[in-house]
Image (tube, grey):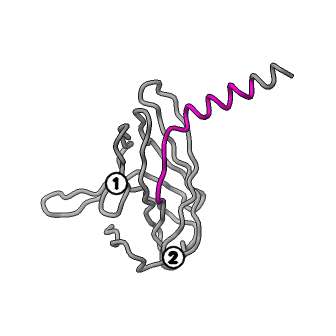
Amino acid sequence: MKKLVASLCLLAAATLAQAQVTIQDPWVRGTVPKQQASGAFMQLSASKDTRLIAAQSPVAHVVEIHEMLMDNNIMKMRQIPGLDIVPGRVLELKPGGFHIMLIELKQQLKGGDVVPITLIFEDTQTKKQFTQEVKAPVTALGGGNMPMKH
């Protein structure tokens, strides 16, 4: 029995050591019927050097990390391989900047829905990967944030 308790404590400690990313204010932009893409936004902070390397969600066939940038006075969006989260700084995923793109949506996303998203991180020192689940509420169309341009 003592070995079982000790094993569970070690497992819990390992899990806590990896749960180093704080996720605040997650949300997903609502869609119209048959719309094929939307964005997920939130603020990420970490206690250790960490990198967001991927994301998954059951509401989309494809989930990518994207950035928007100006190129010759034209706003462009592109997929990127990941985002570094520096301790002591907040990485903001927001419209018009870095965000998580939900592509080939399986259903309309309506205000009041909640979208589960699995964020996949890597500890940049140990190269160990870990995941964190987030439940992002969907904002109704016209609900307060600037529209994404795709």
| Residue 34 image label | 2
Residue at 41 percent of width and 80 percent of height: 142
Label 2, residues with CA under 10 Å away: few <14, some 14-19, many ≥20: few
Q: How far apart are the two marked residues, 2 and 1, measured between alpha carbons? A: 24 Å
- In the rendered structure, the answer to whether residue 114 lies left or right of residue 52 reads right
State the count of labels: 2
Q: Which quarter of the figure has residue 2? A: top right
Q: Quadrant of the C terminus?
A: bottom left
Q: Position of residue 67 (x, y in %)?
A: 32, 54
Q: Specify the amino acid type for callout 1.
A: Phe
Q: Is residue 59 above or below residue 46?
A: below
Magenta residues span 7-25
Q: Which SS does the magenta portion mostly show? A: helix
What residue would you read off at disc 1? 98
Residue 126 falls within the magenta-colored stretch: no
| Residue 144 image label | none
Q: Is residue 14 above or below residue 77?
A: above
Q: Position of residue 11 (x, y in %)?
A: 68, 28
Q: Is residue 89 above or below residue 75?
A: above
Q: Give SS at disc 1.
A: loop
Q: Position of residue 60 (x, y in %)?
A: 54, 60
Is label 2 in contact with label 1 (beta carbons under 8 Å)? no
Residue 12 falls within the magenta-colored stretch: yes
Residue sticking out furthest to the top: 3
- In the rendered structure, the answer to whether residue 84 lies left or right of residue 32 reads left
Residue at 42 percent of width and 25 percent of height: 125
Q: Specify the amino acid type for callout 2.
A: Lys
